[in-house]
Amino acid sequence: MLVTGESSVGKTRLAHWALMTVLPRWRLISPRDGTVVNDLADSPNPPGRLVVWLDELQDYLQGPWQRQEGSELSPDALKRLLLSGTRVVVVGTMWSDRYRELLRLDRRGAPVYPRAYRALKLAGHHVALAASLSGEEQARAKAVATRDGRIARALSSASAGFGVTQALAGGQFLIKRWENASEPERSLITGAIDARRLGVQSRLSPELLRALARAYLHQPAHDDAWFETALAYATEVRHDEAATALLLAVPDSANLDRVGYALAEYLLQEGLKRRAGHSVPELAWQAFTEHVTAPADLLSLGANAERRGMLRHAEDLFRRAGRRPAPTPATTGEAEEKLRQDLAAGDTECWAELVRILQEQGRWEDTEEVLRGAVADGEAQARTELAWLLASLGRTAEAQKVWQDCPDAPEARLQEAALRDFLSQLTSGNQLMRMTTMGPSAWNYSSAFEAGDKRRAARHLARQVALSGVASAWLSIRVGEDSLTGKALIKHWHDAVAHDAPGARHELAAAQARGGDKAEQRWRDAVVSQVPGAWRELAGVLENRHGAGHAERELRQAVAAGDPEALWELQRFLRRRERDSEVEGVWLEAIVAGVPGAFRGLLGLLRRQGRTTEADRLCTYGLNADGTAASPPPESSSHPVPGKEVMDSTNE
């Protein structure tokens, strides 16, 4: 069973109540990491009547929140345990946004975190808790409030934007204390939130907190006397405020002394939202380099510094970690350059490897350029890849045209002609929305057509194409409005999403968005769910309903919050309106906000504008924390920063 929801909505309480109600006499273990579960699955005689309690499930899985390297819960081991015949129940809880992140798919429809994705898909029962109470729950709570002052106060807090359960957990007190804190106290809390935002998952040591808080002070402080006062404020447990504290002490293994601190969960969740896209002071990066020791934390910090073009800090952090993430950006950049040279020299077989490298970096425009070049050279597989890419980006009309413009390729044209002929006989008004080649297994459904059941044949054919992947280039056929419409079409795409069909999430959102005023909200929901191409669709709806200015404002707000999809759509939005002079500023703002791909996007823009010297200098020395170009190191202005090729992979 998996329970998801925002912080302090009752995930752990619900799971505990369910276990005590249904399995009150079963044994329970709460493993320190995933290896305990892996060993349990491999045990010849695992104990029965056992509950495996995985609170904060993301800590056990592949992804940015994994507790430590080598401690990951294996999806294969989890599956063996669940299918072993032993009476074992696995219960996990996690935040909704982390659940969505671990299920996120890239543009090709492949999971970004494949092992975490597989583990989460094993959940037999998923409960998603809402932050607010339903109408029935509200009525019951009001009845209880007449005799319970805590519930009455929580209901009144709900009108201020806090859920009832979050108010009961003291969420409103935590936010109020952060907002009303003095400058040193607020600097301490903000520094702690940014540490978590940039990838520090280990406990926050007093030394790190002191250095971070100093980085956020508006005025210099000659000594550290202010820090102890700020720390006392942050760690004070106020019993009249739901017994909460902003920072919670983390004890050592013997529970003899405190060795660090952790942020209160609700404060962390709200703080991450408010701090998203904010710049990080230079002194904070120095604090990370000097006081963070865990290799996994250092790698995450280094990746975040690199994303912001801060190459010196990235290099220092990677060096302290003892290695770079794999594959290294330097190696990737060198490989790309070599493949481009080979392609220019006439080696037409290297395009596929170049496409793979570009797709791994999320560089979809460069990917499209390479694929179109390969298509022009007569590469049949490149045509399939190009159609697949365009469709997954939501550019379905262009994907269809790729196949309509297919040169004399007998097999493809025969299959397309057969498909057209088959579907054209269903009803007079049918329209094929997407075309591509298909494997022979799909034609088995012709028997249904021959038997006279045309609609059933159409549904089976479309469903088989979407679910089994027989389409060699992202195809799902809509068999006309009179064959698959309304709820039937939405159910079809729900099935496709459940089977991980490429592009299905985008098509589901499109099917749900059809018709009137609901389209905007449907695409907003799709943006929240990180559906590829959703921002492009939403921007179009916003422009049609509210004007181009409104669409641009929403795109800029999303970019400032760190949304990479919105970034790519905003720069396309500006280019279409011949506002190229503004694109550079968008890239710089996105870099400071830490939007993935923004630094490479800026380098690509500079190269396209012929500013190669400027681009080379950025590749060598990077940027400062405020987004300005960094200068050469004072001790050796003629030598580049070690690993200067860290970001030298552009043509964005």
Image: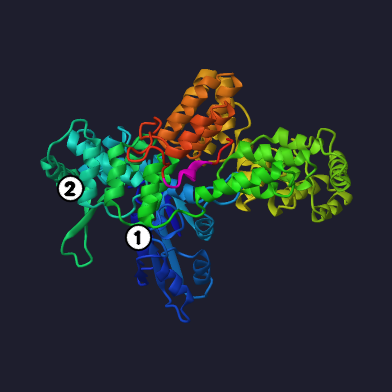
Question: Is mark 1 in CB contact (under 8 Å) with mark 2?
Answer: no
The C terminus - image quarter:
top right
Where in the figure is residue 310, as x and y percent of width and height? 40, 39
The N terminus - image quarter:
bottom left
Q: Are there few (<14), some (14-19), or many (20+) residues within 10 Å of tag 2?
A: some
State which region is magenta: 642-648
Q: Amino acid at mark 1?
A: His
Is residue 203 visible to the viewer in this orientation of the structure?
A: yes
Q: Picture quarter containing residue 403?
A: top right
Q: Nearer the viewer, residue 385 or 351?
A: 351
Q: Is residue 324 above or below residue 255?
A: above
Q: Nearer the viewer, residue 107 or 167?
A: 107
- Whether residue 411 sits left or right of residue 647 in the image: it is right
Q: Picture quarter containing residue 477?
A: top right
- Asked which secondary structure carries label 2, the reply is helix
- Asked which secondary structure carries label 1, the reply is helix
Is residue 152 visible to the viewer in this orientation of the structure?
A: no
Q: Picture quarter containing residue 626?
A: top left
- Whether residue 66 sits left or right of residue 404 in the image: it is left
Q: Amino acid at mark 2?
A: Thr
- Whether residue 4 sits left or right of residue 416 in the image: it is left
Where in the figure is residue 404, as x and y percent of width and height? 81, 36
Whichever of labels 1 and 2 marks the residue nearer the N terminus, that label is 1
Q: Any magenta on residue 285?
A: no
Q: Are there few (<14), some (14-19), or many (20+) residues within 10 Å of tag 1?
A: some
Q: Which residue is mark 2?
A: 235
Q: Which residue is mark 1?
A: 16
Q: Any magenta on residue 644?
A: yes
Where in the figure is residue 554, as x and y percent of width and height? 48, 26
Question: In the image, what residue occupies the spot 78% across and 43% down?
Answer: 436
Q: Look at discs 1 and 2 and give the one toward the viewer.
A: 2
Where in the figure is residue 97, as x and y percent of width and height? 43, 45
